[in-house]
């Protein structure tokens, strides 16, 4: 297994075009609601996390079970909600796989710098960009983006706005935003993606703070993210 490369698995539809078997011999970082498919495809990433307040609240029970269950994930990265990681029980936070994270800036703060550590973690504004920043903190020198598309359909049918985001009231028969059907399900609460503000800017910030000895390559076919060199995954992984 190549321990110098970290593959960030965004959940965009372009990930459908990649053979998951190509990723098995590399360190990978899965995100958000992708846990719903891991058993079905017999694949678990090296790391798993969620850097979104709403998704931490909506998926708290499933995230907690994922940590406690016997699987191959080595580390978990959950920021919690507005109260921070207090969202999770002490038993969970004391688990050896649970990474203690303290956000010291908010997504709308335009002043960005590389985080000093997970206890002084600057929020770049999206789970994918923050997972990449986590990889840099863990010492990876080549970071590959897959499924990081920034091609969201902002407003899905059968969803309602609420004070804490958007609630999906019916599981979509087809969801254009994700690489597998059932990624989002009835009852899920999530934020409007705000592709051209939070999402795209998070990648811009990452490109600006990336150390010169770290290479980030975007292998997400059709991705709108313009800040990194683009290549086909088959040109990099063997």
Image (cartoon, rainbow, N blue to C red):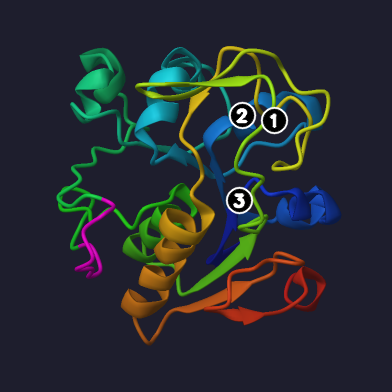
Return the residue at label 3. Answer: 10
Q: Are marks 2 and 1 in contact (CB under 8 Å)?
A: yes
**Front-most of residues 126 and 237:** 126
Q: Residues within 10 Å of mark 3 (few under 14, many from 20)?
A: many
Can you tell which mark lies on residue 4?
Answer: none
Image side of residue 110 versus residue 206, left or right:
left
Q: In terms of image quadrants, where is residue 138?
A: bottom left
Res. 26 visible in picture: yes
Q: Is residue 168 above or below residue 47?
A: above
**Residue wearing tag 1:** 38
Task: Choose between 89 and 199: the one closer to the eye.
Answer: 199
Q: Position of residue 132 (x, y in %)?
A: 45, 60
Please state the horizontal and vertical placement of residue 112, each as a whole percent of the image: 23, 68
- Residue 217 located left or right of residue 21: left
Are the residues flagged by discs 1 and 3 in contact, CB closer than 8 Å?
no
- Residue placed at 26% from the left, 19% from the top? 87
Q: Which mark is on residue 35?
A: 2
Q: Earlier in the sequence, mark 1 or mark 3?
A: 3
Secondary structure found at label 1: helix
Callout 1: 10 Å neighbours few (<14), some, many (20+)? few
């Amino acid at each position: 297994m190549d321990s110098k490369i970290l593959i960030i698995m965004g959940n965009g539809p372009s990930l459908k075009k990649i053979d998951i078997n190509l990723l098995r011999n590399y360190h990978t970082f899965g995100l958000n609601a992708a846990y719903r498919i891991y058993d079905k495809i017999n694949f678990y990433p090296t790391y798993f996390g969620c850097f979104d307040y709403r998704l931490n609240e909506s998926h708290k029970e499933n995230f907690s079970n994922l940590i406690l269950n016997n699987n191959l994930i080595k580390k978990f990265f959950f920021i919690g909600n507005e109260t921070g990681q207090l969202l999770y029980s002490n038993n969970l936070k004391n688990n050896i796989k649970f990474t203690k994270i303290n956000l010291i800036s908010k997504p709308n703060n335009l002043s960005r710098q590389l985080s000093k550590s997970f206890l002084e973690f600057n929020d770049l504004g999206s789970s994918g960009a923050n997972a990449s920043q986590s990889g840099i903190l863990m010492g990876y020198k080549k970071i590959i983006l897959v499924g990081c598309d920034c091609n969201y359909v902002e407003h899905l049918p059968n969803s309602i706005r609420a004070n804490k985001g958007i609630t999906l009231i019916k599981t979509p028969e087809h969801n254009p935003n994700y690489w597998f059907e059932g990624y989002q399900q009835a009852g899920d609460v999530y934020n409007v993606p705000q592709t051209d503000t939070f999402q795209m800017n998070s990648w811009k910030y990452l490109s600006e703070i990336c150390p010169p000895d770290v290479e980030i390559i975007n292998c997400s076919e059709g991705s709108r993210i313009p800040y990194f060199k683009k290549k086909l995954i088959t040109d990099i992984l063997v």
